[in-house]
Image (cartoon, grey):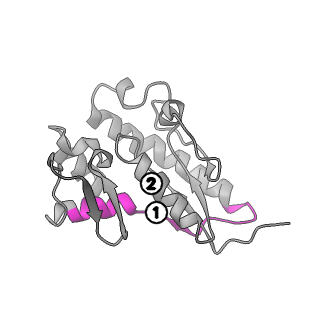
């Protein structure tokens, strides 16, 4: 018997600490509502994932540093540039591949962008303080642990990296 889905959402978690676990939880919640989910982590990040959800479809893309991820690049900024170049190509290839399946992708998740938008506007205070047990993420109707907040917000290069992710170099 073939399963009918309301939609097919492609989830692209940014491959740094604090992005993947919230995206997995988000994906499982969305899938429980009848939406097919395909998660596209990078090949390098996928190698380090401890537990993979069996209920979600996983299709890896390349970040250009498949053996070591951002540790393989000379800096996080260099990694981000490489990921933008190579990741864009391999993501396009994945979208083409999925377009030809019986349930083509018709949405992409931007949940992490929501976190950065609210942090940039000062609505969500980052980095979290030690007393923050849970963080309420506006428009996601869920909470997350402070330890799940993307790690690079405390990085000295964070402002430049955020700018590159938001508007490009």
Point out the tag, 2 or 1, that comes first from the N-terminus.
Answer: 2
Give the residue number, with chain letter if any, for mark 2: 23
Q: Please name whichever residue, 46 or 99, is drawn nearer the observer in this view of the structure.
A: 46
Q: Please name whichever residue, 14 or 135, is drawn nearer the observer in this view of the structure.
A: 135
Instruction: Pinpoint residue 163: horizontal percent, then vertical percent.
Output: 22, 52
Q: Secondary structure at mark 1?
A: loop
Give me the residue at 46% from left, 60% from top. 26
Q: Is residue 10 left or right of residue 162?
A: right
Instruction: Pinpoint residue 10: horizontal percent, then vertical percent.
Output: 55, 59
Up the image or down, 154 lies above or below 48; here it is below
Give the residue number, with chain letter if any, for mark 1: 109
The answer to if 67 sits in the magenta stretch is no
* Residue 103 placement: quadrant: bottom right
The segment highlighted magenta reads 99-118
Q: Is residue 69 left or right of residue 41?
A: left
Q: Residues within 10 Å of mark 1 (few under 14, many from 20)?
A: some
Up the image or down, 32 lies above or below 134; here it is below
Give me the residue at 17% from left, 53% from top. 126
The answer to if 115 sits in the magenta stretch is yes
Q: Please name whichever residue, 110 or 76, is drawn nearer the observer in this view of the structure.
A: 110
Q: Quadrant of the N terminus?
A: bottom right
Q: Secondary structure at mark 2?
A: helix
Residue furthest to the right? 1
Q: Nearer the viewer, mark 2 or mark 1?
A: 2
Looking at the image, how many numbered discs can be counted on the residues? 2
Instruction: Pinpoint residue 33: horizontal percent, then vertical percent.
Output: 58, 71
Report how far apart the C-alphas of labels 2 and 1 lie in the structure: 9 Å
Q: Could you tell me if residue 169 is visible in this image?
A: no
CB contact under 8 Å: marks 2 and 1: yes
Instruction: Pinpoint residue 143: horizontal percent, then vertical percent.
Output: 33, 61
Give me the residue at 76% from left, 65% from top. 102
Q: Any mark on residue 136, and which?
A: none
């Amino acid at each position: 018997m073939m399963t009918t889905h309301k939609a097919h959402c492609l989830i692209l978690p940014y491959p740094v600490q604090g992005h993947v676990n919230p995206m997995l939880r988000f994906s499982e919640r969305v899938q429980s509502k009848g939406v097919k989910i395909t998660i596209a982590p990078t090949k390098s990040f996928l190698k380090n994932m401890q537990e993979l959800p069996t209920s979600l479809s996983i299709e890896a893309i390349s970040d250009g540093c498949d053996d070591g991820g951002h540790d393989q690049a000379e800096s996080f900024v260099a990694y981000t540039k490489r990921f933008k170049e190579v990741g864009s190509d391999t993501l396009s290839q994945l979208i083409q591949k999925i377009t030809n399946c019986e349930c083509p992708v018709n949405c992409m998740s931007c949940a992490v962008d929501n976190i950065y938008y609210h942090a940039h506007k000062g609505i969500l205070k980052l980095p979290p303080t030690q007393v923050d047990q849970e963080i309420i993420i506006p428009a996601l109707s869920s909470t997350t642990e402070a330890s799940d907040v993307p790690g690079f917000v405390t990085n000295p290069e964070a402002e430049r990296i955020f700018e590159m992710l938001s508007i490009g170099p």
